[in-house]
């Protein structure tokens, strides 16, 4: 999708919303949008165009352009300092770029929103180091996030509905922690804490998941289970996975999905993993000879 098409779609959507707000009538787009609802009708979940970020003269991102489709699982690889973390910081509102565009769907300009608002519209981020409430049980950690209320008192002293209990049960099974539901989170292994944090994100029903080195420190078995989990989520969510573990990337891409290689703040190469692994520039700056 071209930048002109993206911008035209966003303007048309904004004009439609304005008509609905003032006249209370629909237009050619169907039902009115609720506040913060994302439009994915053009098939794009995330769109970055010419994003540049400088820190004291150093360009952490240099005219970075990237498109992630709805339901796509995209792996982002590259050497340290390539701009991977800064890219995710821009998407989630932690860092404001010097220039460029960052859109979620065709209608949400993420550069106009702060971090909490970006999370609210459906962008979830998992950092490399898991952050869970270690004094609470696995179940309670998920419960707090399901309610979208980080107040422990508000979360733990009200009754769950049957639908909520069903969803928590499904989440526990999905993240391989059903047998650990009542265990204190601080007693989990590193890999299990990673799964719990992923479950905490999923409890908030994000449309886009940003995952930063999710298998760092995991055992081989845990890494394999995490790959299975992400492949299960593919299609239901859009996933951007930043990773250095090439075996894990190979498991996720299954020989058919696109991989993006970042270097010096921009896209160095993009294509199937086998293609980028044989790319001379990628071999030189990242994979080694």
Image (tube, helix red, strand yellow):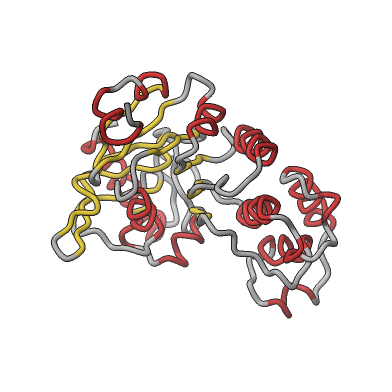
Q: Farthest bottom residue?
A: 153
Q: Can residue 19 be seen at all in this image of the molecule?
A: no
Query: Quadrant where the N terminus lies?
Result: top left
Relative to 104, residue 251 above or below: above
Relative to 204, residue 263 above or below: above
Q: Can residue 284 be seen at all in this image of the molecule?
A: yes
Query: Quadrant where the C terminus lies?
Result: top left
Residue found at x 70% / y 67%: 144
Left or right? Give the position of 144 relative to 248: right
Residue 207 picture location, percent across and down: 53, 46
Number of marks present in the image shown: 0
Q: Which is more toward the observer, 48 or 105? A: 48
Residue 225 picture location, percent across and down: 68, 37
Residue found at x 43% / y 41%: 45
Q: Quadrant of residue 110?
A: bottom left
Q: Which is more toward the observer, 201 or 103? A: 201
Q: Farthest front residue?
A: 289
Left or right? Give the position of 265 relative to 147: left
Residue found at x 27% / y 47%: 11
Left or right? Give the position of 48 relative to 255: left
Residue 106 picture location, percent across and down: 36, 43
Left or right? Give the position of 64 relative to 246: left
Residue found at x 34% / y 51%: 87
């Amino acid at each position: 999708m071209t930048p002109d098409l993206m911008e035209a779609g966003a303007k048309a959507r904004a004009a439609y919303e304005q008509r609905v707000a003032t006249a209370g009538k629909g237009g050619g787009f169907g039902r009115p949008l609720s506040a913060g609802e994302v439009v994915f009708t053009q098939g794009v979940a995330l769109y970055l165009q010419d994003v540049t970020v400088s820190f004291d003269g150093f360009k952490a991102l240099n005219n970075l352009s990237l498109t992630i489709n709805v339901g796509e699982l995209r792996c982002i690889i590259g050497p340290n300092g390539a701009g991977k973390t800064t890219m995710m910081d821009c998407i989630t509102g932690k860092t404001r770029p010097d220039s460029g565009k960052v859109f979620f769907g065709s209608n949400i300009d993420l550069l106009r929103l702060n971090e909490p608002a970006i999370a609210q519209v459906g962008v979830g981020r998992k950092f490399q180091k898991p952050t869970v409430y270690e004094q609470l049980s696995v179940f309670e950690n998920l419960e707090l996030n399901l309610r979208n209320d980080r107040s422990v008192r508000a979360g733990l002293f009200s009754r769950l509905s049957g639908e909520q209990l069903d969803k928590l049960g499904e989440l526990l099974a999905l993240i391989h922690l059903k047998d650990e539901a009542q265990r204190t989170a601080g007693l989990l292994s590193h890999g299990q804490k990673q799964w719990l944090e992923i479950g905490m994100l999923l409890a908030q029903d994000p449309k886009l998941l940003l995952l930063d080195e999710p298998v760092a420190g995991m055992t081989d078995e845990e890494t394999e289970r995490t790959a299975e989990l992400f492949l299960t989520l593919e299609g239901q969510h859009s996933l951007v996975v930043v990773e250095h573990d090439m075996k894990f990337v190979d498991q996720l891409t299954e020989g058919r999905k696109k991989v993006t290689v970042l270097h010096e703040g921009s896209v160095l190469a993009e294509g199937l993993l086998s293609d980028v692994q044989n790319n001379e520039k990628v071999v030189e700056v990242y994979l080694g000879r």
